[in-house]
Amino acid sequence: MNRNKILDLVNIKLRKNRPKVPETFNHTLWIEHQSSKPFVQLWFRTRGCRHNYRGGCTMCDYWISDLVSPEQMVASVEEGLGKLDFEPDMILLNSSGSVFDDWEVPPVARQKILELLSRYRKTTFIFETRAETISSQKIAECVKILKGRNIIIEMGFESTDPWVLKYCINKSLELKNVISAVQTLKKFNVKSIANILAGAPFLTFSETIKDVVNSINWAFEHDVNQCVLFPMNIKPWTLMYWLEQYGIYTLPSLWILVDVISKLDIRLLPYVHISWYKARPQSHPLYQESNRSPITCPKCYDNVIRLLNEYNSSDNRARILEKLMELSCDCKLQWHEQIEIKPRQSLVERVQTNYEVIARQILGEQWWNQYGEATLAEIESPG
């Protein structure tokens, strides 16, 4: 996939002064109970996502730091695990990008980190990484070190529409690499999770719902074991933050999760989870603002969150979905009215219009006068 030059440049410009994670802040530990079972998310400091240095996704900020040595990475994970006085049911290990990217996490560091994790005999391990970082050699090593444990690889798909990936999300993801990665994991009896984003910029709410449903169905049709549905969160130092500040983007209502799930085959619900649908405190020590999650309204928010929590922990998700669909509120009606609004421009026209605004404001009039016409001409029609 050819890269989207304008979004790369814009993202680099917006993140120019982004604070780096200091050397003294080496890990975060998030502990919660899912179905009364302890779930642990452990992040450790790396220099950041490789893709981020070239521009990165429009909504993503998993932080950056100076170059981190393999020894420091291992020590960070060891320190985090040392704070646990119990054996978790599940550990999600993530870095600032991809755990299986040798550029970010050198093989020697990854091997020793896996050996640290091997102390847990009954824990299921989830590793976050991009699809193109998966190889037979890496997965074979992981399976060998964590012999007998359940292993899951979680990959950010966001969307499976190549047009949306390129022109809305700026994620250089080739679907052929996704298919190859999933088949490699199957060969080693390692489960796969696809992360799907609800809320890509420039799409109408109706187009967003359609894209998410299509992406989830595509993932299962191509042998992915589970999907995690992520509503858009607005993060500092991202294009999404800028778009919202300028009134170009509106965060979807939390009701979008209900609309998406209700359009899926009921047999898929046990394998479709939801995440990042409620606010988490900002843990970056130098950031002044927290991420912002989608909401409903004050009258129904607590009930919606309670039912979404129940959905994740329930063995009968269809019944919880029914309760969510039966829940009535004025904000739900308003949300459905917003879904029905027809755009005045086609998707290509919307992207062209917004690219011009973005480029003039962020890259400058001179840049747009020199490259704008060619930039618009490169935008292809959706397939």
Image: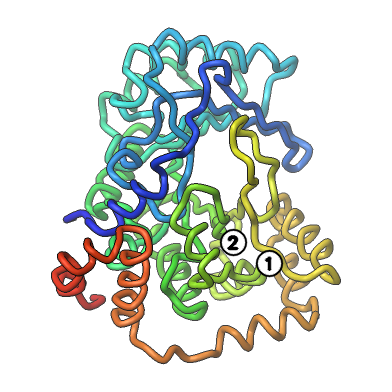
In terms of image quadrants, where is residue 300? bottom right
How many other residues sit within 10 Å of disc 2, few (<14), some (14-19) or many (≥20)? Answer: many
How many other residues sit within 10 Å of disc 1, few (<14), some (14-19) or many (≥20)? Answer: some
15 shown above or below 202: above
Instruction: Name the amino acid, label 2.
Output: Leu
Q: Which residue occupies the foreground of this view, 321 or 354? A: 354
> Where does label 1 land, which residue?
318
Badges 1 and 2: C-beta atoms under 8 Å apart? yes
Query: Residue 381: percent from the left, percent from the top?
Result: 22, 78
Number of numbered markers: 2
Label drawn at residue 269: 2
Q: Residue at x 37, y 20 (%)?
A: 67
Q: Residue at x 62, y 22 (%)?
A: 122
Q: Is residue 103 left or right of residue 48?
A: left
In terms of image quadrants, where is residue 362? bottom left
Q: Which residue occupies the foreground of this view, 370 or 285? A: 370
Instruction: Name the amino acid, label 1.
Output: Ala
Query: Residue 93: percent from the left, percent from the top?
Result: 52, 29
Q: Which residue occupies the foreground of this view, 268 or 128? A: 128
The answer to which of marks 1 and 2 sits earlier in the sequence is 2
Where the N terminus falls, by quadrant? bottom left
Q: Residue at x 78, y 83 (%)?
A: 330
